[in-house]
Amino acid sequence: MAFDVDLIRAQFPILQREINGKPLIYLDNAASAQKPDTVLDVMSDQARHAYANVHRGLHTLANETTEAYEGARAKIQAFLNAPSPESVVFTKGGTEAINLVASGITDSINSGDEIVLAISEHHSNIVPWHFLRERHGAVLKWVPLLEDGRLDMDAYRQALGPKTRMVAIGHMSNVLGTVVDAKEVVRLAHEVGAQVLLDGCQAGVHLDIDVQDIDCDFYVLTAHKIYGPTGIGALYGKLDALKALRPYQGGGEMIEIVEMDRVTYNEPPHKFEAGTPPILQAIGFGEAIDWLSQFNKEDIRAHEHSLYEQASAELSKINGLTEYGLSEGKGPILSFSIEGAHPHDIAQLLDRYGVAVRAGHHCAQPLMKHLGITATARASFAIYNTTADVEAFIEALHKARGLLL
Ligand SMILES: Cc1ncc(COP(=O)(O)O)c(C=O)c1O
Protein backbone atom coordinates (compact mmCIF):
# COMPACT_ATOMS: atom_id res chain seq x y z
CA MET A 1 0.00 0.00 0.00
CA ALA A 2 1.20 3.54 -0.76
CA PHE A 3 2.73 5.27 2.21
CA ASP A 4 0.51 8.13 3.44
CA VAL A 5 1.34 9.22 6.96
CA ASP A 6 -1.95 11.09 7.44
CA LEU A 7 -3.95 7.98 6.58
CA ILE A 8 -1.73 5.98 8.90
CA ARG A 9 -2.15 8.42 11.78
CA ALA A 10 -5.92 8.33 11.41
CA GLN A 11 -5.81 4.64 12.36
CA PHE A 12 -4.21 5.31 15.76
CA PRO A 13 -6.89 6.72 18.07
CA ILE A 14 -4.42 7.69 20.80
CA LEU A 15 -2.68 10.14 18.49
CA GLN A 16 -5.75 12.39 18.80
CA ARG A 17 -4.97 12.95 22.47
CA GLU A 18 -3.77 16.14 24.02
CA ILE A 19 -1.20 16.13 26.82
CA ASN A 20 -1.04 19.21 29.04
CA GLY A 21 -3.19 21.05 26.53
CA LYS A 22 -0.85 20.28 23.63
CA PRO A 23 -1.21 17.71 20.86
CA LEU A 24 0.53 14.45 21.79
CA ILE A 25 3.91 14.02 20.11
CA TYR A 26 4.71 10.39 20.82
CA LEU A 27 8.44 9.71 20.51
CA ASP A 28 8.75 6.82 22.95
CA ASN A 29 8.24 4.11 20.36
CA ALA A 30 11.33 2.09 21.26
CA ALA A 31 9.75 1.54 24.69
CA SER A 32 6.35 0.60 23.28
CA ALA A 33 4.52 1.56 20.10
CA GLN A 34 0.88 2.62 19.83
CA LYS A 35 -1.72 0.28 18.36
CA PRO A 36 -3.89 0.82 15.28
CA ASP A 37 -7.68 0.33 15.41
CA THR A 38 -7.50 -2.95 13.56
CA VAL A 39 -5.33 -4.54 16.27
CA LEU A 40 -7.61 -3.29 19.04
CA ASP A 41 -10.72 -4.36 17.12
CA VAL A 42 -9.56 -7.85 16.24
CA MET A 43 -9.01 -8.70 19.91
CA SER A 44 -12.31 -7.25 21.00
CA ASP A 45 -14.20 -8.94 18.10
CA GLN A 46 -12.64 -12.28 18.87
CA ALA A 47 -13.57 -11.98 22.54
CA ARG A 48 -17.11 -10.90 21.67
CA HIS A 49 -17.92 -13.38 18.94
CA ALA A 50 -15.55 -16.33 18.71
CA TYR A 51 -13.85 -16.96 22.01
CA ALA A 52 -13.02 -20.20 23.83
CA ASN A 53 -9.84 -21.92 24.99
CA VAL A 54 -7.48 -23.20 22.31
CA HIS A 55 -6.51 -26.76 21.36
CA ARG A 56 -8.86 -28.30 23.88
CA GLY A 57 -12.39 -28.41 22.66
CA LEU A 58 -14.31 -30.14 19.98
CA HIS A 59 -16.88 -27.40 19.74
CA THR A 60 -17.20 -24.64 17.19
CA LEU A 61 -15.88 -21.76 19.29
CA ALA A 62 -12.84 -23.75 20.44
CA ASN A 63 -12.09 -24.61 16.84
CA GLU A 64 -12.55 -21.05 15.62
CA THR A 65 -10.30 -19.68 18.36
CA THR A 66 -7.65 -22.33 17.73
CA GLU A 67 -7.71 -21.50 14.03
CA ALA A 68 -7.21 -17.80 14.76
CA TYR A 69 -4.43 -18.51 17.30
CA GLU A 70 -2.56 -20.89 14.99
CA GLY A 71 -3.23 -18.48 12.11
CA ALA A 72 -1.37 -15.81 14.08
CA ARG A 73 1.56 -18.19 14.47
CA ALA A 74 1.62 -18.70 10.69
CA LYS A 75 1.70 -14.91 10.19
CA ILE A 76 4.73 -14.60 12.45
CA GLN A 77 6.34 -17.53 10.66
CA ALA A 78 5.92 -15.68 7.35
CA PHE A 79 7.10 -12.37 8.86
CA LEU A 80 10.39 -14.01 9.94
CA ASN A 81 10.57 -16.35 6.95
CA ALA A 82 10.78 -19.22 9.43
CA PRO A 83 10.65 -22.63 7.77
CA SER A 84 7.65 -23.96 9.70
CA PRO A 85 5.03 -22.82 12.23
CA GLU A 86 6.45 -25.34 14.70
CA SER A 87 9.58 -23.23 14.92
CA VAL A 88 7.61 -20.26 16.32
CA VAL A 89 6.84 -20.33 20.06
CA PHE A 90 4.51 -17.78 21.58
CA THR A 91 5.92 -16.19 24.73
CA LYS A 92 4.68 -13.34 26.85
CA GLY A 93 7.27 -11.01 25.37
CA GLY A 94 10.92 -10.61 24.51
CA THR A 95 12.05 -11.11 28.08
CA GLU A 96 10.30 -14.45 28.43
CA ALA A 97 11.66 -15.67 25.10
CA ILE A 98 15.25 -15.06 26.21
CA ASN A 99 14.63 -16.60 29.64
CA LEU A 100 13.13 -19.62 27.91
CA VAL A 101 16.34 -20.23 25.96
CA ALA A 102 18.71 -19.44 28.84
CA SER A 103 16.88 -21.77 31.20
CA GLY A 104 16.37 -24.36 28.46
CA ILE A 105 20.09 -24.88 27.85
CA THR A 106 21.08 -25.36 31.50
CA ASP A 107 21.51 -29.13 31.08
CA SER A 108 24.27 -28.60 28.56
CA ILE A 109 26.08 -25.80 30.43
CA ASN A 110 29.18 -26.75 32.38
CA SER A 111 31.29 -24.58 34.63
CA GLY A 112 33.62 -22.48 32.46
CA ASP A 113 31.38 -22.53 29.38
CA GLU A 114 31.19 -19.10 27.82
CA ILE A 115 28.29 -16.85 26.83
CA VAL A 116 29.24 -13.94 24.57
CA LEU A 117 27.24 -10.72 24.92
CA ALA A 118 27.56 -7.20 23.50
CA ILE A 119 28.10 -4.47 26.06
CA SER A 120 25.00 -2.76 24.62
CA GLU A 121 22.54 -5.52 25.57
CA HIS A 122 19.21 -4.78 27.19
CA HIS A 123 18.98 -6.21 30.72
CA SER A 124 16.52 -8.78 29.32
CA ASN A 125 19.40 -10.18 27.32
CA ILE A 126 21.86 -10.01 30.21
CA VAL A 127 20.20 -11.13 33.41
CA PRO A 128 19.00 -14.57 32.16
CA TRP A 129 22.66 -15.30 31.26
CA HIS A 130 23.79 -14.06 34.68
CA PHE A 131 21.56 -16.80 36.10
CA LEU A 132 23.71 -19.30 34.19
CA ARG A 133 26.82 -17.63 35.59
CA GLU A 134 25.49 -17.68 39.17
CA ARG A 135 23.97 -21.16 39.10
CA HIS A 136 26.09 -23.12 36.62
CA GLY A 137 29.48 -21.40 36.56
CA ALA A 138 29.12 -20.01 33.02
CA VAL A 139 31.46 -17.17 32.12
CA LEU A 140 30.07 -14.02 30.50
CA LYS A 141 32.32 -12.47 27.86
CA TRP A 142 31.58 -8.92 26.83
CA VAL A 143 32.19 -7.40 23.42
CA PRO A 144 32.71 -3.61 23.39
CA LEU A 145 31.48 -1.12 20.80
CA LEU A 146 33.43 1.07 18.44
CA GLU A 147 33.31 4.84 18.85
CA ASP A 148 30.30 5.11 16.50
CA GLY A 149 28.29 2.54 18.46
CA ARG A 150 28.80 -0.45 16.15
CA LEU A 151 29.89 -3.79 17.55
CA ASP A 152 33.67 -4.17 17.57
CA MET A 153 33.95 -7.17 15.27
CA ASP A 154 37.65 -7.70 15.97
CA ALA A 155 36.91 -7.93 19.68
CA TYR A 156 33.97 -10.21 18.85
CA ARG A 157 36.22 -12.60 16.92
CA GLN A 158 38.60 -12.66 19.87
CA ALA A 159 35.79 -13.35 22.34
CA LEU A 160 34.79 -16.51 20.48
CA GLY A 161 36.53 -19.77 21.27
CA PRO A 162 36.07 -23.47 21.86
CA LYS A 163 34.25 -22.81 25.15
CA THR A 164 31.65 -20.47 23.60
CA ARG A 165 28.22 -22.08 23.93
CA MET A 166 26.00 -19.15 23.12
CA VAL A 167 26.26 -15.73 21.52
CA ALA A 168 23.36 -13.54 22.66
CA ILE A 169 23.29 -10.23 20.86
CA GLY A 170 20.74 -7.53 20.10
CA HIS A 171 20.03 -7.11 16.39
CA MET A 172 19.40 -3.38 16.99
CA SER A 173 20.39 -1.49 20.13
CA ASN A 174 17.47 0.00 22.04
CA VAL A 175 19.68 2.92 23.12
CA LEU A 176 21.81 3.66 20.07
CA GLY A 177 19.74 2.23 17.23
CA THR A 178 22.91 0.64 15.86
CA VAL A 179 22.51 -2.61 13.93
CA VAL A 180 24.81 -5.62 14.02
CA ASP A 181 25.89 -7.55 10.95
CA ALA A 182 23.74 -10.48 11.99
CA LYS A 183 24.87 -12.87 9.28
CA GLU A 184 28.54 -12.33 10.08
CA VAL A 185 27.91 -12.64 13.83
CA VAL A 186 26.20 -15.97 13.22
CA ARG A 187 28.77 -17.24 10.70
CA LEU A 188 31.66 -16.61 13.10
CA ALA A 189 29.83 -18.15 16.07
CA HIS A 190 28.95 -21.27 14.11
CA GLU A 191 32.60 -21.65 13.14
CA VAL A 192 33.39 -22.31 16.80
CA GLY A 193 30.29 -24.45 17.31
CA ALA A 194 28.33 -21.89 19.32
CA GLN A 195 24.63 -21.14 18.98
CA VAL A 196 23.35 -17.61 18.38
CA LEU A 197 20.33 -15.89 19.87
CA LEU A 198 19.46 -12.58 18.26
CA ASP A 199 17.34 -10.22 20.31
CA GLY A 200 15.13 -8.65 17.65
CA CYS A 201 12.90 -6.68 20.03
CA GLN A 202 13.97 -3.40 18.38
CA ALA A 203 14.88 -4.68 14.92
CA GLY A 204 11.58 -6.45 14.28
CA VAL A 205 9.64 -3.30 13.53
CA HIS A 206 12.31 -1.66 11.34
CA LEU A 207 14.25 -4.34 9.46
CA ASP A 208 13.31 -7.14 7.08
CA ILE A 209 14.02 -10.28 9.04
CA ASP A 210 14.82 -13.55 7.34
CA VAL A 211 15.88 -16.05 9.96
CA GLN A 212 16.83 -18.67 7.38
CA ASP A 213 19.11 -16.26 5.58
CA ILE A 214 20.64 -15.02 8.85
CA ASP A 215 20.91 -18.66 9.95
CA CYS A 216 20.56 -17.78 13.66
CA ASP A 217 19.54 -20.52 16.06
CA PHE A 218 17.07 -18.32 17.94
CA TYR A 219 15.37 -15.00 17.15
CA VAL A 220 13.30 -13.00 19.63
CA LEU A 221 10.37 -10.69 18.85
CA THR A 222 8.04 -8.69 21.05
CA ALA A 223 4.64 -7.59 19.76
CA HIS A 224 4.19 -4.37 21.68
CA LYS A 225 6.98 -2.65 19.76
CA ILE A 226 5.48 -3.78 16.42
CA TYR A 227 2.13 -2.01 16.91
CA GLY A 228 0.76 -5.11 18.64
CA PRO A 229 -0.50 -5.75 22.16
CA THR A 230 1.51 -6.28 25.33
CA GLY A 231 1.79 -9.70 26.93
CA ILE A 232 2.84 -11.49 23.76
CA GLY A 233 6.05 -12.13 21.89
CA ALA A 234 7.62 -14.88 19.89
CA LEU A 235 10.69 -17.05 19.96
CA TYR A 236 11.85 -18.48 16.67
CA GLY A 237 14.14 -21.47 17.03
CA LYS A 238 15.60 -23.96 14.61
CA LEU A 239 13.53 -27.04 15.22
CA ASP A 240 16.47 -29.14 16.44
CA ALA A 241 17.57 -26.34 18.75
CA LEU A 242 14.06 -26.07 20.19
CA LYS A 243 13.81 -29.83 20.61
CA ALA A 244 17.06 -29.81 22.58
CA LEU A 245 15.82 -27.20 25.07
CA ARG A 246 14.52 -28.34 28.42
CA PRO A 247 10.94 -27.07 28.84
CA TYR A 248 10.78 -23.77 30.65
CA GLN A 249 7.50 -24.18 32.49
CA GLY A 250 5.35 -27.20 33.24
CA GLY A 251 1.59 -27.42 32.88
CA GLY A 252 -1.22 -28.27 30.53
CA GLU A 253 -0.65 -28.48 26.76
CA MET A 254 3.12 -28.86 27.00
CA ILE A 255 2.89 -32.55 27.84
CA GLU A 256 2.37 -35.77 25.94
CA ILE A 257 1.82 -38.22 28.80
CA VAL A 258 1.58 -37.54 32.52
CA GLU A 259 1.64 -40.47 34.91
CA MET A 260 2.23 -40.65 38.63
CA ASP A 261 5.92 -41.40 38.21
CA ARG A 262 6.79 -40.02 34.77
CA VAL A 263 6.05 -37.32 32.26
CA THR A 264 6.81 -36.93 28.57
CA TYR A 265 6.63 -33.70 26.67
CA ASN A 266 4.79 -32.44 23.63
CA GLU A 267 6.69 -31.39 20.52
CA PRO A 268 7.67 -27.73 19.92
CA PRO A 269 6.12 -25.23 19.91
CA HIS A 270 3.57 -26.64 22.39
CA LYS A 271 6.34 -27.98 24.63
CA PHE A 272 7.03 -24.34 25.55
CA GLU A 273 3.47 -23.07 25.81
CA ALA A 274 2.35 -24.40 29.18
CA GLY A 275 -1.13 -23.45 30.34
CA THR A 276 -3.70 -21.29 28.61
CA PRO A 277 -1.71 -18.94 26.39
CA PRO A 278 -2.45 -15.24 25.85
CA ILE A 279 -4.91 -16.12 23.11
CA LEU A 280 -6.35 -12.70 22.32
CA GLN A 281 -2.92 -11.09 22.42
CA ALA A 282 -1.52 -13.66 20.00
CA ILE A 283 -4.36 -12.91 17.59
CA GLY A 284 -3.67 -9.18 18.04
CA PHE A 285 0.00 -9.84 17.32
CA GLY A 286 -0.92 -11.58 14.07
CA GLU A 287 -3.12 -8.64 13.11
CA ALA A 288 -0.30 -6.18 13.85
CA ILE A 289 1.98 -8.18 11.55
CA ASP A 290 -0.69 -8.11 8.83
CA TRP A 291 -1.18 -4.38 9.33
CA LEU A 292 2.53 -3.62 9.11
CA SER A 293 3.05 -5.98 6.20
CA GLN A 294 0.68 -4.01 3.96
CA PHE A 295 3.48 -1.39 3.67
CA ASN A 296 6.81 -1.72 2.01
CA LYS A 297 9.40 -1.81 4.81
CA GLU A 298 11.78 0.17 2.60
CA ASP A 299 9.21 3.03 2.50
CA ILE A 300 8.81 2.86 6.27
CA ARG A 301 12.55 2.87 6.81
CA ALA A 302 13.01 5.86 4.48
CA HIS A 303 10.25 7.77 6.29
CA GLU A 304 11.54 7.02 9.78
CA HIS A 305 15.15 7.64 8.80
CA SER A 306 14.32 11.06 7.37
CA LEU A 307 12.69 11.98 10.70
CA TYR A 308 15.73 10.76 12.56
CA GLU A 309 18.07 12.74 10.25
CA GLN A 310 15.96 15.87 10.63
CA ALA A 311 16.05 15.59 14.42
CA SER A 312 19.73 14.67 14.58
CA ALA A 313 20.70 17.64 12.38
CA GLU A 314 18.75 20.04 14.62
CA LEU A 315 20.18 18.53 17.80
CA SER A 316 23.73 18.90 16.50
CA LYS A 317 23.22 22.70 16.55
CA ILE A 318 22.52 22.72 20.31
CA ASN A 319 25.49 23.67 22.48
CA GLY A 320 26.52 21.04 25.00
CA LEU A 321 24.39 18.33 23.39
CA THR A 322 25.90 14.89 22.73
CA GLU A 323 24.20 12.29 20.58
CA TYR A 324 25.18 8.66 21.17
CA GLY A 325 25.55 6.15 18.35
CA LEU A 326 26.11 7.81 14.99
CA SER A 327 26.79 4.89 12.69
CA GLU A 328 25.48 4.51 9.13
CA GLY A 329 22.35 2.45 8.66
CA LYS A 330 21.18 2.73 12.24
CA GLY A 331 17.52 2.62 13.24
CA PRO A 332 15.47 5.71 14.11
CA ILE A 333 16.51 5.84 17.75
CA LEU A 334 18.16 9.01 19.00
CA SER A 335 19.81 9.07 22.42
CA PHE A 336 21.28 12.30 23.70
CA SER A 337 22.31 14.25 26.75
CA ILE A 338 22.78 17.95 27.39
CA GLU A 339 25.64 19.11 29.57
CA GLY A 340 24.30 20.44 32.88
CA ALA A 341 20.76 19.05 32.40
CA HIS A 342 19.61 15.71 33.79
CA PRO A 343 17.85 13.56 31.15
CA HIS A 344 14.94 13.01 33.57
CA ASP A 345 14.42 16.76 33.83
CA ILE A 346 14.56 17.07 30.04
CA ALA A 347 11.89 14.36 29.64
CA GLN A 348 9.65 15.88 32.30
CA LEU A 349 9.86 19.33 30.76
CA LEU A 350 9.21 17.96 27.27
CA ASP A 351 6.06 16.36 28.63
CA ARG A 352 4.80 19.82 29.54
CA TYR A 353 4.80 20.51 25.80
CA GLY A 354 3.09 17.24 24.96
CA VAL A 355 6.29 15.49 23.85
CA ALA A 356 6.80 11.95 25.15
CA VAL A 357 10.42 10.75 25.23
CA ARG A 358 12.16 8.27 27.48
CA ALA A 359 14.96 9.09 29.91
CA GLY A 360 17.13 6.87 32.06
CA HIS A 361 19.51 3.96 31.58
CA HIS A 362 17.04 2.23 29.22
CA CYS A 363 17.70 -1.13 30.90
CA ALA A 364 21.26 -1.01 29.59
CA GLN A 365 23.46 -0.23 32.58
CA PRO A 366 26.62 -1.89 31.17
CA LEU A 367 26.28 0.30 28.07
CA MET A 368 25.85 3.43 30.20
CA LYS A 369 29.04 2.52 32.08
CA HIS A 370 30.83 1.89 28.77
CA LEU A 371 29.76 5.36 27.59
CA GLY A 372 30.76 6.92 30.93
CA ILE A 373 27.27 8.23 31.67
CA THR A 374 24.33 7.20 33.84
CA ALA A 375 21.40 8.12 31.62
CA THR A 376 20.32 9.59 28.30
CA ALA A 377 17.14 11.08 26.92
CA ARG A 378 15.85 9.07 23.96
CA ALA A 379 13.52 10.03 21.13
CA SER A 380 12.50 7.12 18.91
CA PHE A 381 10.46 7.38 15.74
CA ALA A 382 7.69 5.24 14.32
CA ILE A 383 5.67 4.91 11.15
CA TYR A 384 3.07 7.49 12.30
CA ASN A 385 5.50 10.28 13.24
CA THR A 386 5.78 13.36 11.06
CA THR A 387 8.18 16.19 10.31
CA ALA A 388 5.81 18.39 12.35
CA ASP A 389 6.41 16.05 15.30
CA VAL A 390 10.14 16.58 14.95
CA GLU A 391 9.70 20.36 14.74
CA ALA A 392 7.52 20.34 17.88
CA PHE A 393 10.11 18.17 19.67
CA ILE A 394 12.98 20.51 18.76
CA GLU A 395 11.03 23.61 19.74
CA ALA A 396 10.10 22.03 23.09
CA LEU A 397 13.69 20.93 23.64
CA HIS A 398 14.94 24.48 23.16
CA LYS A 399 12.38 25.70 25.69
CA ALA A 400 13.30 22.93 28.16
CA ARG A 401 16.97 23.71 27.80
CA GLY A 402 16.27 27.39 28.42
CA LEU A 403 14.49 26.49 31.66
CA LEU A 404 17.19 24.11 32.85
CA LEU A 405 20.40 26.02 32.07
C1 LIG B 1 16.44 -4.72 22.93
C2 LIG B 1 15.34 -5.19 23.85
N1 LIG B 1 15.36 -6.44 24.30
C3 LIG B 1 14.39 -6.92 25.11
C4 LIG B 1 13.36 -6.11 25.52
C5 LIG B 1 12.32 -6.69 26.43
O1 LIG B 1 11.14 -6.99 25.72
P1 LIG B 1 9.74 -7.18 26.47
O2 LIG B 1 9.31 -5.82 26.90
O3 LIG B 1 8.85 -7.73 25.42
O4 LIG B 1 9.93 -8.14 27.56
C6 LIG B 1 13.31 -4.80 25.10
C7 LIG B 1 12.21 -3.91 25.55
O5 LIG B 1 12.42 -2.81 25.97
C8 LIG B 1 14.32 -4.32 24.22
O6 LIG B 1 14.32 -3.06 23.79
Image: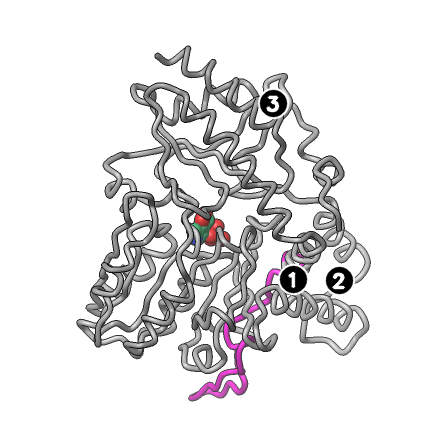
Amino acid type indicated by mark 3 = Ile
Percent across and percent down for residue 123 are 35, 51
Q: Earlier in the sequence, mark 1 or mark 3?
A: 3
Q: Residue at horizontal 72%, vertical 76%? A: 57
- For label 3, the residue is 19
Measure the alpha-carbon separation of dots 1 and 2. 9 Å
* Neighbour tally class for label 3: few under 14, some 14-19, many 20 plus, Cα within 10 Å: some
- For label 1, the residue is 279
- Do the CB atoms of the residues marked 1 and 3 lie less than 8 Å apart? no
> Mark 1: which secondary structure?
helix
> Mark 3: which secondary structure?
strand
Percent across and percent down for residue 295 are 69, 52
The answer to whether 29 appears left or right of 39 in the picture is left
Percent across and percent down for residue 111 are 18, 73
Q: Residue at horizontal 57%, vertical 54%? A: 223
Q: Residue at horizontal 35%, vertical 24%? A: 321
Measure the alpha-carbon separation of dots 1 and 3. 33 Å
> Could you say which is closer to the camera, residue 80 or residue 145?
145
Residue 295 drawn above or below residue 189: above
Instruction: Give the magenta-colored segment's residue range.
Output: 254-281
Measure the alpha-carbon separation of dots 2 and 3. 36 Å
The answer to which image quadrant residue 198 occupies is bottom left
Q: Residue at horizontal 58%, vertical 77%? A: 83
Magenta run includes residue 264: yes
The answer to whether 89 appears left or right of 335 in the picture is right
- Do the CB atoms of the residues marked 2 and 3 lie less than 8 Å apart? no
- For label 2, the residue is 51
Residue 340 drawn above or below residue 336: above
Percent across and percent down for residue 61 are 79, 68
> Mark 2: which secondary structure?
loop
The answer to whether 144 appears left or right of 342 in the picture is left
Q: Earlier in the sequence, mark 2 or mark 3?
A: 3
